Amino acid sequence: MPYPLTIAGLEKSFAGQTVLGPINLDLEAGTITAIIGRSGSGKTTLLRCLGSLEQPSAGTITIGDGKVTASDIGYVFQEPRLMPWLSVAKNAGFGLGHLPKPARDLAVAEALAVVGLPGAGTLLPKQLSGGMAQRVALARALAPRPKLILLDEPFSALDPFTREQMQDHLLHLHGHYGATMVLITHDMDEALALAHRVIVLDGPPGRIIGDFAPALPHPADRTSALFFEWKRRLTALFSHRDLAAELANAL
Amino acid sequence: MVGGRTPRWIIGFAVPILLLGVWQAVSGAGFVSPAILPSPLLVITTLVVMAQSGEMAQAVGATAFRMAFGFFLGAGAATFLGGLCGASAQARALLDPLIQALRSVPSLAWVPLFILWLGIFEASKITLVAVGVFFPVYLNLVSGIANVDRKLLEVGRVHGFSPLRRLVRIQLPAALPAYVVGLRGGLGLGWMFVAAAELLGATNGLGFILDDGEQTGRPERVLAALLLFGLCGKLTDWALATGGRKLVSWQDIAKA
């Protein structure tokens, strides 16, 4: 069962300087939520708080029933961050040390197949392209079958063709695993193509300035008039922050 | 022209062969007394005689035993303490200042104490070698662990790794290249210290032959022992470098 996520009054400060918050947010179980915003708007800080990589300065984060273990949460970083001394299969099974070997091998094989790398298990990270390495990082996050997956601009370093392919993969993965996903991105196309809900952050300090649920089909037709219309609205929100209220009223 | 298709190991022989030629020419022409610099031919003859009499095998064996024992002792202790101090800030705060202070003591200055405590036989020599090996291995391992990429450590954090698991799964493998460099440095110092230990008092080993050659005015024995020291050092370093390269073959680095 995927986990819902509740963020209440979350704030984060570094050296007395508030960079994020307060953030209040309820995310439904099993949905994909994209968080978009400019650089410095606190997107990554928010995700790092959700992934316990940063300790919030104030507020609470409740994931599922609150009794969460590390294997319940998958985290995909901006870079693959593979262990260069481990094969692809061992990287994919990096978080599965608690499982007996047959179960671990099965979970790794499944995760690598789902990300489209079924025969790459014996390769070393130095032998992989950027796209392949990021798919292994996805497999590593998916292999423990997490109930919540946090993705920090996972495709931003990839070329546009590979990026779109990876976005399709992500949708496929969501269909397969059904986990709740939180995706940080600065790419509006990516947010609209993948997410059920788009949260717009701006800052510093990072605050929610927009919260939308574009009723677009998944996978989205990126050439449709509706897609363009949503993109225009989001662009307008960034260009003229004062339009936020107007948009919220209009939608 | 150097390079092209000529294997590198052959190129590496060019300068030694040239020096050997100059040496033979200088001693052959009688420019230098054989009591100061014997000819290469005499040194080779001495080596052959030592090999035939069994003296070479006995001396190399005795030195290699001290070296191997001291190396594993020093490297083992350095690996344990380096791993501990690298992984735990508390252990580092507790032990590292003392270890760094001990490092400032010139290693040969320990000799009198080791002889007093451990006697003049094997134990003091092996301990001296271990001390020489310890510091480069310890320092490289601690700095290798301390310099592990924060981004890799975060992967361990999101997987909920304990400090021990983080050490075994991330920090030690990531520090392996620095560790191999430390082992090679330690090996070099180990050979230096085994020679020093044997020079200070031994009845066998290559250092004993060095001392004996000096005492009896036979420089060909000194040069033969030096040659054997160099050969042993080079062979063990080559073995360690080859093994080390295999261990860190995952590194994505340019081939020199």
Image: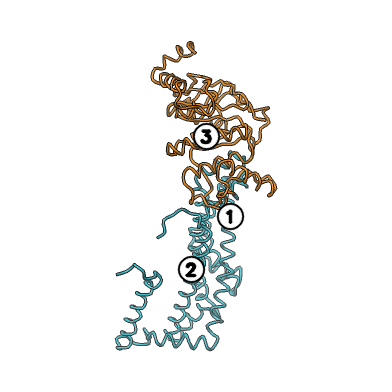
Chain colours: A orange, B cyan
In front: B29, or B158?
B158
* Residue A154 in sight: yes
Check disc 1 and report the residue beneath it.
B81
- The quarter in which the C terminus of chain B is drawn is bottom left
Label 1 marks which chain's residue? B
| Closer mark to the observer between disc 2 and disc 3 | 3
Say which element carries label 2. helix
Q: Residue at x 51, y 85 (%)?
A: B51
Check disc 2 and report the residue beneath it.
B238
Q: Residue at x 43, y 27 (%)?
A: A38
| Closer mark to the observer between disc 2 and disc 1 | 2
The reply to whether callout 2 and callout 1 are in contact (CB within 8 Å) is no
Mark closer to the chain start, 2 or 1: 1
Q: Are discs 2 and 1 located on one and the same chain?
A: yes
**Residue B75 pos. (x, y %):** 56, 62
In front: B160, or B139?
B160
Amino acid type of the residue that numbered disc 2 sits on in the rendered structure: Trp
**Residue A86 pos. (x, y %):** 56, 51
In the image: residue A47, left or right of residue A147: left
Say which element carries label 1. helix
Amino acid type of the residue that numbered disc 1 sits on in the rendered structure: Leu
Q: Is residue B214 positioned above or below A98 on the image?
A: below
Task: Give the Cα separation between the discs numbered 1 and 3.
Answer: 49 Å
**Residue A3 pos. (x, y %):** 64, 28
Residue A106 circle label: none
Density class for disc 1 (Cα within 10 Å; few <14, some 14-19, many ≥20) is: many
Amino acid type of the residue that numbered disc 3 sits on in the rendered structure: Asp
Q: Is residue A140 positioned above or below B210 on the image?
A: above
Q: Is residue A209 positioned above or below B133 on the image?
A: above
